[in-house]
Image (tube, rainbow, N blue to C red):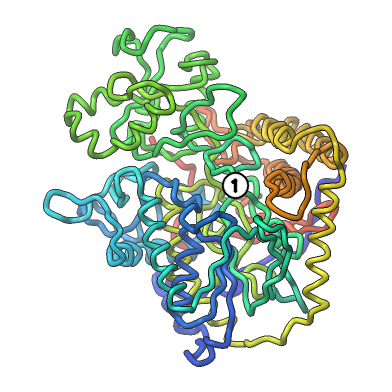
Amino acid sequence: MMLFTEGAPIKDTRVPSGPIEERWDRRRFEARLVNPANRRRLTIIVVGTGLAGASAAATLGEAGYRVRSYCYQDSPRRAHSIAAQGGINAAKNYRNDGDSVHRLFYDTVKGGDFRSRESNVHRLAQVSVEIIDQCVAQGVPFTREYGGLLDNRSFGGAQVSRTFYARGQTGQQLLLGAYQALERQVAAGTVAAFTRHEMLDLVVVDGRARGIVVRDLVTGEVTTDLADAVVLATGGYGNVFFLSTNAKGCNVTATWRAHRRGALFANPCFTQIHPTCIPQSGPHQSKLTLMSESLRNDGRVWVPLRAGDGRAPGDIPEAERDYYLERMYPAFGNLVPRDIASRAAKNVCDDGRGVGPGGLGVHLDFADAIARLGRPAVEERYGNLFEMYQRITGEDPYEVPMRIYPAVHYTMGGLWVDYDLRATIPGLFVIGEANFSDHGANRLGASALMQGLADGYFVLPNTINDYLADGPFPPVSRAEASSAVTAVNDRLARLLAVNGDRTVDSFHRELGRIMWDHCGMERTDAGLRKAIEEIRALRSEFWTRVRVPGDGDGLNQALERAGRVADFFELAELMCVDALHRTESCGGHFRAESQTPDGEALRDDERFAYVAAWEWTGGAPVLHREALEFEYVTPSQRSYK
């Protein structure tokens, strides 16, 4: 079967030339500006109110644009960014331990297994130092040292302490800061906020993104909202696996509908498995719970040396324990990047040395830290995380080790954007996890919050001006807007009309199992081909057997989920096609056929040093390659030993 066709190469034409340290400053100077009087006549729609969306809407409103902010939650404070726990990276070098913008740049490119753009990553490292000052000025209560300075801790993939944090609630505190900035602009009248509205399509007129189609989740009314530019800040697509650390509402619909309208989707197979999650307790679960990567600063990961050792952890002496990350990666120990720690946990469990129900878990042990630092110090650093773990599992991590196992967490793929964060549809900008631009094949811990706030506070507000300098654009006719509404209503009616005998969640759970088994931590040629066949068969069954009770004239969460799962089916197939065509291993994409003798990911830079940007056709997708060029970091076999 023909899975895809080849298209013309794609290139980022807006990245400046010259020394990498000067490119962002050069781009900001060369980009055209919009004078304050004209900004008041221009409208920008921002979809999503997480860290990227809230910070972007607040900053654009402060700049004087008319901003319309949308989210499907009942409050912007319910965005999934609030769930982030461990911290946010910034190259401040407060610890005087050798950190710098260049080191953060290097660590991020290396951590992404040399599959990200150098220019984008260096800009991210530069901007990181401004983010902390911005957030402190907003009153974000970062943890401080005894002397009053901001504290730092380490995260995976780094040998310096550059992660700023607020105990285990960093995402919540940062989101509250962005939310307050957003609400300030709502009160000032520059931002109009619309909650409980879900974007179901992108309005494209004369090749430009001119608005969105939304459904009021309370009344069921489907309407359009028009603007001069649209910004998508709608997060990632990890819930394609059904079980993930994402909130249940997280979905791909906004970016996928933009993809169907012509926006290229880049690197969809690059998904991140987080090694520090509470193991699944049974088939009844609908999501998994993340335990912060920060716990690996003081917690030691181990399993019994002997397969099938069912003794309680306290009964296993030190000599019969395998601290496998410390043994395998002595330079980084328990702070190796997430993809490496996840595969290592899978391997020891596959060897029969896992702990807990089904042998799908490893110990994360704080006994040494409590003995060294004292319980009060550990409580100060991780107390809320320990409390959360105890409430969920009924086990006290101060007395017995935590049990953890890898789970789907973050997605490095997303809509393709250039250096200005423009998608391939003029007028469409994509920020935060919704784009692909900064993390390559693996995201380092504490870099998601960094990218979201960098895009929203600093990058987008500087680059969107260059596009809007051509505005205002011709008004959109009522006919052009109503045709988009008709298409959305027809799709909703089709879902309601099936009236089958299977629930939406039963299809989603089955799709998730296919993806986890064949496009999860380890992928093979045969497995991916089998997955594509099974996804296609299940998608056909979905459209003949799904049952969506109720109607579309009001609150109907089954209808919401059905539309999202329908999009997940199409995304899942593209993810498998992308993983199948990339016969190398890199970062979170591990092909069993491509590994080093000691089981590490084996890249193929000769054939695959490119971004895979996919075009929607309704049939076999078209692959457009963006070549990756490395001037400042030489790709090498990634080693943390």
Q: Is residue 581 above or below residue 257?
A: above
Q: Quadrant of residue 68?
A: bottom right
Query: Residue lying furthest left in this view?
Result: 147
Give the camera-side residue of 228 and 599. 228
40 left or right, relative to 146: right
Q: Position of residue 348 (x, y in %)?
A: 49, 20
500 left or right, relative to 279: right
Q: Position of residue 602 (x, y in %)?
A: 56, 38
Q: Is residue 351 above or below residue 637?
A: above
Please name the amino acid that badge 1 sits on: Gly
Q: Position of residue 468 (x, y in %)?
A: 58, 83
Crowd rating for badge 1 (residues with CA inside 10 Å; few <14, some 14–19, many 20+): some
48 left or right, relative to 474: left
Q: Residue at x 84, y 58 (%)?
A: 490
SS category of the residue bearing label 1: loop
Q: Is residue 107 above or below residue 396?
A: below
Q: In the rendered image, which residue does mark 1 sit on?
A: 249
Give the camera-side residue of 525 and 163. 163
Q: Quadrant of residue 133?
A: bottom left
Give the camera-side residue of 378 and 476. 476
Q: Residue at x 45, y 46 (%)?
A: 83
**Which quarter shows the C terminus?**
top left
